[in-house]
Structure formats: C-alpha cells, structure tokens
Image (cartoon, rainbow, N blue to C red):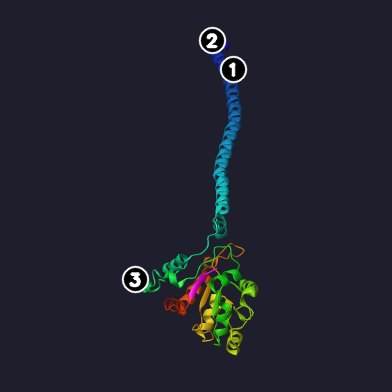
Amino acid sequence: MGDDLGEEWWKHDSKSGGSEEEEEESRTEGTEKGNVQKESVKRKKPTENSAGAKKKKTRTHDRQEPEEPGKSTKSSKRRKKKTITDVLASSEPKPGCPADVQNLLTHYFADKRSVIELEELKLHDSCFLSCNDLTHSLSSYLKQICPKWSKVQKQHTQKSSVVLLIVCSSAIRTIELIKQLTTFKGEAKAVKLFAKHIKIEEQLKLLQKGITHIGVGTPARISALIDKDGLDLQALRYLVLDWNWRDQKLRKMIDIPEIKLDLIKLLETGVLGQCKADKVKIGLF
C-alpha cells in the first residue's frame, strides 16, 4: 500500500506541514504588527488630545484677552467723563459783564426771532449799572449802585410793586440775600418771592396789603406774580441779578437750564422795554 502511494504522499505531507508553520508565523507576525500599531495609535492619541487642548486653551485665552481690556476701557471712559462741576471747577471765576447778558439773549433767540427782532433785543451799555468785581458783599454793592437809597425808598408809595428787585436761583439763596440786606435796607421792607412753602395767593395779598420796597426771589415766581397782575414793574428802578454766585455744584444761575429759561422769560415780559425806556437799570452782582 505504501508502494502504491509512492513518493507523492511525502511531498504532500511536507507541503502541508510547511504551510501550517508559515501560517502560524504569519499569524504571529500579524498579531505583533497589530499590537505595535495599536500601541503607536495609543501613544499618538494623547499627543493629539494634548495639542488640541492646548489649542483650545489658546483660543479661549485669545478670546478672553480682548474682553478684559475692553471692560477696562469702558470703565476708564466712564471715569474720564467730565461733569459740568468738573468743568466749572477747572475754570477761574470771572465777574459778569453786560456782554454776558447780551450773549444770553442773542443765543436763545437766534433761531426764534428775525434779524430785526434780534436788533430790538440789544441793550445799550447805559442800561447797565456797574458790575460786581467779586470783592463786594451784597450791601456794599447796593450802596455803590444806589447811593441815594434812603431818599428813593421814602419816595416809593405804590402798592403791589417794588423799587429794587433781586433775582436769584433758589429759595435758600433768597433767604441768604435777605439776611445780607440788613446794613443796606434801613427802614425799607423786603419780601420773599419764591414758590417753596409759600402759596402765590399769600404773596399777592402781602404785596397788595402794604408798601414793599425790595423784592428778592426766583425768576419763575416773579414772572408768575407779574402774569397775575400781582407785581407791577412801573415803580421798578433797579434789577439786580445774582450772576456770579455758584451753588454746591459750582453752577451759576445761567448754568441751570430751567432757571436760565425762567430768567429769559422774566427779562422778556417787560424788563427789557423798561430798560430801553431808561426806567430800569440792570446790575450783575
């Protein structure tokens, strides 16, 4: 039987045996290569992740950097924004002059009146009294512009009117100015003309009841009394504006918008006409 098979079975066996060994070797080599590749992949993955994390960190860092200086610039801009108090504090106080009143009227009526009407608003220098040079008290200033006050007050006998009208910005300032009148007014009677805690009806009765020589108050209440025929300007001779005084925020009377408008209205209601007729003189204290 072995003779019948001949030598071919040896060859077959040798071939089959060799293939199995080669297959095993190839398998082992494949597994080893696969393990090596897996290990290389595992090694590469953390490096890729770390690089991505670094990129993300740098991106987030790049995003955060412009935000922080942006916030600081906004806060710095807010801090650097100047108020009217800062501007006024940096400027040196200058005494008022007639040109200031004229500029006030010209700027306000520039787009509201014609050229001819603007010419009518101009006041001559003769309409103004000497201005306070920031060295006078109220009494010393009034003595300078009204040297014959005792005679003037005796000649005044008209009710619902005043000879001297002092215009200021607030009720508190009104009370302060009335206290400063002590050494000037003599026997003259002064009346407070402001809206705080005083009804306009009470002031109308007070003006009609007796003779009042000096009126001190705010432009809004004075204008309201004129509109109600409670205050007559026919006897008025001196109009003094509390021009140079500054409040706690360093604002003058014309720096407060509502007071500024009330003052312009008061001048327009009849004072300017009286000034042009040479009946009223304007003083800037």
Q: Which residue is mark 1?
A: 21
Q: Which residue is mark 2?
A: 7
Q: Which residue is mark 3?
A: 115
The residue that appears at 45% across and 76% down in the rendered structure is: 275
Label 2 element class: loop
Label 1 element class: helix
Label 2: few (<14), some (14–19) or many (≥20) C-alpha neighbours in 10 Å: few
- Using the image as rendered, state which of residue 139 and residue 48 is in the foreground: 139
The residue that appears at 64% across and 72% down in the rendered structure is: 180
Q: Quadrant of the C terminus?
A: bottom right
Disc on the earlier residue, 3 or 1? 1
Q: Is residue 273 left or right of residue 28?
A: left
Secondary structure mostly seen in the magenta stretch: strand
Picture quadrant of residue 247: bottom right
- Give the vertical position of 31 relative to 154 (above or below): above
- Look at the image and give the residue range highlighted in magenta: 281-285
Image location of residue 176, percent across then percent down? 64, 71
- In the image, which is nearer the foreground, mark 3 or mark 1? 3
Label 1: few (<14), some (14–19) or many (≥20) C-alpha neighbours in 10 Å: few
Disc on the earlier residue, 3 or 2? 2
Disc on the earlier residue, 2 or 1? 2
- In the image, which is nearer the foreground, mark 2 or mark 1? 1
Residue 250 has which mark? none
Image location of residue 269, percent across then percent down? 46, 79
The residue that appears at 55% across and 10% down in the rendered structure is: 3
Label 3: few (<14), some (14–19) or many (≥20) C-alpha neighbours in 10 Å: few
Image location of residue 119, percent across then percent down? 36, 71
* Amino acid beneath label 3: Val
